[in-house]
Amino acid sequence: MKGFLLAVALLAVGSLAAQTITIKKVEVSGDKIIVYYDLEESNPDREFLLNMFASRDNFTAPLQKVKGDIGPEVKPGLNKKVEWSIREEYGGYKGKLSLEIRGKIYVPFVKLQNFDAAKSYRRGKQYDIMWRPGNTDPIHIELYKGNQRVAGDLNQPNNGSYSLSIPSGAKTGSDYRLKITDSKSAEDVIYTSYFKVKPKVPLLLKVLPVLVIGGAAAVLGGGGGGVKGGSSSGTGTGTSGGDIVTPPIPPGG
């Protein structure tokens, strides 16, 4: 990774009409590349959609393994920071690399209204997702577990509602999230926060009926099996089935 840091060549400067993005510094921290930049804008309340690109693919596709001041709803300011997991994105990459940050004023194509990532979602069930449309472009709505696509629907109408189905065969976990993409602009992507997927029926409810049935079988087996007891001398103190046990006669009685 140290060799990679020395090979970082150009630090690109991006322009957003009256706004300016300037990359100020690049650092390496373990397998992470940390990029510091300034986003200058006269209106502090304006928001931007920003993406970071690299020269490996000629700045074609936005980098995915990034977090920090990147993506939608970024506000202007100095010393903004983006953390890029280069090893996750490129593996053992070697060679020169240029970085660039591009962006535009953020007008969301969807604005989620009722999605709660703090709650748990059960597999095999459906949930209504609502949003406020920002345009009329069809959208892709996809369910991901980590980096793996689990399910989804492409070219759905951007009409403000969708029924999310959690597949019954989905693995449980807390690393699920939704990816929503404008079908006519690959750079316009929204990810929800990570949420948890649980089994359809709680494990305790699945186990309890088995325990009850097993207990009932033991009682029935004991009643109908003619279990006998008593001494070997044949004093008649044993039981059979549901008979009442007669206590033994005390000596001299």
Image (spheres, grey):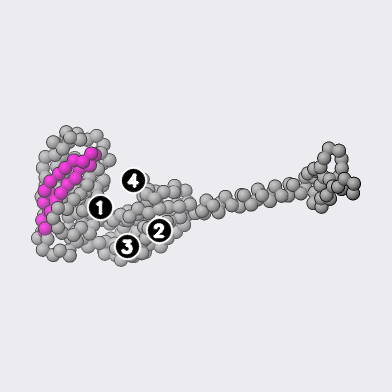
**Of circles 2 and 1, which is in front?**
2
Q: CA distance from mark 3 to mark 1?
A: 19 Å
* Magenta segment includes 25: yes
Q: Amino acid at mark 2?
A: Lys
- Check disc 2: other Cα within 10 Å, few if <14, some if 14-19, many if 20+: few
Q: CA distance from mark 3 to mark 4?
A: 22 Å
Instruction: Quickly name the residue at label 2.
Output: 119
Indicate the secondary structure of the residue bearing disc 2. loop
Q: Position of residue 29 (x, y in %)?
A: 21, 41
Q: Judging from the image, what secondary structure is the residue with disc 4 in?
A: loop
Give the alpha-carbon distance from disc 2 to disc 1, as whole Å: 29 Å
- Residue closest to the eye, 100 or 81: 81
User: In the image, is residue 87 above or below residue 187?
Assistant: above
Between discs 4 and 1, the one toward the N terminus: 4
Q: Which residue is mark 3?
A: 112
Q: Quadrant of residue 159?
A: bottom left
In this view, the residue in front, 231 or 206, is 231
Q: Earlier in the sequence, mark 3 or mark 2?
A: 3
Residue found 24% across the figure and 50% down from its top? 67
Residue at 22% of width from left, 59% of height from top?
73
Q: 227 and 120: which one is in front? A: 227
Q: Earlier in the sequence, mark 3 or mark 1?
A: 3
Q: Give the residues in magenta.
A: 19-40
Task: Give the numbered dot on residue 147.
Answer: 4
Q: Which residue carries the number 1 mark?
A: 186
